Amino acid sequence: MIRTEELLLNMGPQHPSTHGVLRLVVTLDGENIVDVQPDIGYLHSSVEKMMEHRTYLQNIALVDRGMDYLTAMANEEVWVLATERLARIDVPARARYIRTLMLELQRISSHLIWLGTFGIDLGAFTAFLWAMRERERIMDLFESATGGRLHHVYFRIGGVYEDLPEGWPERCAEFCDHMTAKLPEYDELLTGNPIFVARTQGVGVLSRDVAIALGASGPVARASGLAYDVRKAHPYEVYDQLEFDIPMRTEGDCFARYLVRLEEIRQSVRIIRQCLERLPQGEVRGKVSMTLRPPKGEVYARTESPRGDLGIYLVSDGSDTPYRVKIRAPAFSNLYALTEMMRGWKVADVIAILGSIDIVLSDVDR
Amino acid sequence: MNTSPPPPSTGLLSLLDRTWQGALGLAIGLGSTLRTMFQPKVTVSYPIEKVNVSPRWHGLLALPIDPETDNDKCIICFQCERVCPDRCIHIEATGKAKDRVLTRFDIEMDLCCYCGLCVDVCPTEAIVFVPHYEMSTYNRANLNYDLEDLHRAAPKEPIAHGVVKVPNGRRA
């Protein structure tokens, strides 16, 4: 019998398909994957430590870029939510609706980026261009309301910075119509594409039990049959007053993760429409001191970021800067499930499986 | 429930069927890309035409001149200097109480993270954002904006919104 030995293959950290600077140490037996170990830390920015040296207000600008840079609004949300709970600050109703609106717009924009890059990973370049085209409209909406396209610094402790500009709700409603009209095109391009289906269906299966054991959350867990969404389980802002479904699949493969995210875009559009309808009048920002000093204590706030369960554990010692901040990053926990998903598949599936869990390395490393 | 995947069929009929399904799926996809070809273009060819950003754009910072007093509106409260996360604003003043005069107002735009907290805390709207985004330069020293630069940076007239043709734009 011919003696074979395992081959150790390095993918990354400068590989175009690893979505940033992730190094995968892949153990191969011929073409079959025996083991995959993700090596992280190339984008570590020590944001948790940096937050200890900045005031609560200044940290809003930091969580935008220090954490997941594609979902700045979700980062701001979890930070202001933690601070508001610790300092017991009330938020005006209008501001809560605006925040929910922005969070869902950010969810769509993040999922669109994922859709585009996942398409590129599997050789479908058109999806990327189309997703960017739709995302550009969201960026324009963000720009006119907040002044920033990626880093908004829009949420404030006790509200939002400014009210929505004139005509913004109409433009947003127009975008909702545009998005629902464009989604069938993605179905035509990807869902019905035999190559796309062949490369994703049944590939990289993550079972429900393993997903729970490894702490996977967000679309990855929901595609594995775990109907868990922080927006429903621990509602924040106005999610408890809105009607929306949690898309769930039981297959647990790459295709299921794709379908879950596509359905989430539809649900986000539904939430945005409801918010626009019910948007109350009134103040958008309560009076909060620039140098806020929350009382001594600790708090854990969790939100559903586009990637999953995003939480911040915040300890205050009564000064104007936090004593300790711990970020529970969804992409980090989802990356754990990678090894389980990949075992037994071919080396060509590495990219498809890695792409399907939607990691952002600045969220993984922080 | 069927737990094991169906065995791969090898018959000629199944092969033809799969080929047909594949061709159909591709044709539908190509059809939708073809449709897009005849839709209006969304790309802005940047050097020839450019996008004017929204009035709230986090761009260049400026100290506009107040036409009433013919001076900037700064009351030297140092709030922006204190709130800046990057500590890129430097303010110095001489005199006491009401006779204080601004002698130095420097912003190191290369350190600025465009968070807008200085604009937020300013009680007199003395420091504002200008919807301008072409600030790149070959020299870092050019990004140190002093009082005069910041006065000059303030726009004299409102800036148009949307995509516009650049008069002297040329292809890069």
Image (spheres, coloured by chain):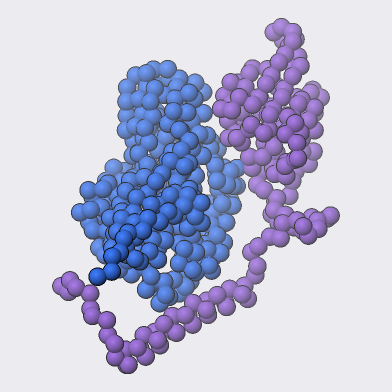
Quadrant, the N terminus of chain A: bottom left
Count of all numbered marks drawn on residues in the image: 0
Q: Looking at the picture, does residue A262 appear above or below residue A319?
A: below
Residue A267 image point, x, y percent:
38, 58
Residue in view at x 40 percent, y 77 percent? A194
Q: Nearer the viewer, residue B8 or A158?
A: B8
Q: Is A113 on the left-hand or right-hand side of A25? A: right
Residue in view at x 41 percent, y 71 percent? A196
Quadrant, the C terminus of chain A: top left
Residue A204 image point, x, y percent:
31, 62
Residue in view at x 32 percent, y 59 percent? A6
**Furthest-top residue in view?**
B96
Q: Looking at the picture, does residue A187 appear above or below residue A339?
A: below
**Furthest-right residue in view?**
B168
Chain ID for blue: A
**Among the 4 quarters of the image, the one containing residue A165:** top right
Residue A171 image point, x, y percent:
56, 55
Q: Nearer the viewer, residue A304 or A357?
A: A357
Q: Work out whether residue A99 can be spotted.
A: no
Residue in view at x 38 percent, y 72 percent? A197
Q: Is A152 on the left-hand or right-hand side of B140? A: left
Q: Work out whether residue A366 can be spotted.
A: yes
**Among the 4 quarters of the image, the one containing residue A84:** top left
Residue A307 image point, x, y percent:
39, 50
Q: Looking at the picture, does residue A319 appear above or below residue B170?
A: above
Chain ID for purple: B
